[in-house]
Amino acid sequence: MNKNVVNLYTSASILAKYNVRHMKKTETYTVRVTCRSARHDIRGVDYHVTEWGDRGNPLLVLLHGWGDCGRSFQFLVDELKQEWFVIAPDWRGFGKTGSRATSYWFPDYVADLDALLEHYQPQEPVNLLGHSMGANVIGLYAGVMPERVATFVNVEGFGLNDSDPQDAPANYRRWIEQSRVMPKYASYATFEELAQRIRKRNPSVSHDKAMFVAKQWAEQVDDVTVTLRADPAHKLPNAMLYRRAEALACWSKIASPVLRVVGEDTDFTAAAKSWIDADSAATPPLGAETIVIPGAGHMVHFEQPGRLAIAVEAFIQANLQTVV
């Protein structure tokens, strides 16, 4: 808004009404660090990867959660103070990465990560940050391939509650029956409608950031429809029950320093609160340092990217793993 416009609205109440009526529809998040797109064949899948910074800088890999995409880490990247080469892939079937499948298997994400690191930094261990599902992928990978991980920042990635093997028959049946008709994601009339849904779930996210995320998560397919960039097969139940003992076995093999980040206002981790407060031997991953970020729920990288950036860089610097 220029000075001439401001001068027309000297009344605070009028200005407030003007902002609500007009600014919310036009404000745009201002990107501070320019990104670029890269594409790689990762285990037969056309992977899309967002890159920021000079490739000669220390590598930092950011891995998104279920339903998200790599570009939504833009807010975090904009808050980083050190010079990094940052990459953030879209997991298979999310964002701009290909692979329409009848099912998605968690071990594929672990193997995809290994192939991705082999491409970007094959010789040295890597600094990794994962959110939610992305953190769970790293947790397994860091135990399976501990020599490949320099530091691990786990943002709201606690695994799932253990399953009962007796539930396997019913679970297989549920998976078969639901697979007969592929589920669908909701569609939206406008990006604004999707942005409002994002803000409803994450009230502390500003409108401009919500609109930015909406345009990364979705695409306009015709004049009246905005649809999510995600394979609907992701909505199917997993045919395999979650076996927490296996995750614990992998976590127990992690050799790198681990920082566990929790949003103070999250309800997503309600079941994990007892693990966080319990003896460190029982918390996932084992022996991790924990910080709680105020003013954030589950989507910490949306809601408090500045605080998250400070914590991440301090943690990596303290562990002296930034030299490539």
Image (cartoon, rainbow, N blue to C red):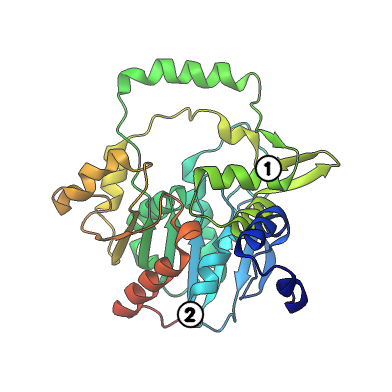
Q: Is residue 314 above or below residue 224?
A: below
What amino acid type is highlighted by mark number 2? Pro
Closer to the camera in the image, 168 or 152: 152
| Disc on the earlier residue, 1 or 2 | 2
Residue 211 seen in render: yes
Q: Amino acid at mark 1?
A: Glu
Q: CA distance from mark 1 to mark 2?
A: 38 Å
Q: Is residue 190 left or right of residue 125?
A: right
Asked whether disc 1 touches disc 2, contact meaning CB atoms under 8 Å apart, the reply is: no
Between 289 and 107, the residue placed more toward the observer is 289
Dividing the picture into quarters, in which one does residue 37 lie? bottom right
Report x, y in % for residue 27.
Answer: 69, 62
The residue at the point 30 percent across, 24 percent down is: 164
Residue 68 vertical position relative to residue 292 in the rendered view, above or below: above
* Mark 1 nearby-residue class (10 Å; few <14, some 14–19, many ≥20): some
Q: Of residues 261 and 282, which is closer to you in this image?
A: 261
Mark number displayed over residue 184: none
Picture quarter with the N terminus: bottom right
Side (left or right) of 83 relative to 256: right
Q: Residue at x 43, y 65 (%)?
A: 128
Q: Is residue 154 left or right of residue 114?
A: left
| Residue 57 image point, x, y percent | 52, 82
Q: Which mark is residue 58?
A: 2
Where does label 1 land, which residue? 193
How far across and how far down the image is residue 203, in percent? 49, 49
Q: Is residue 47 visible?
A: no
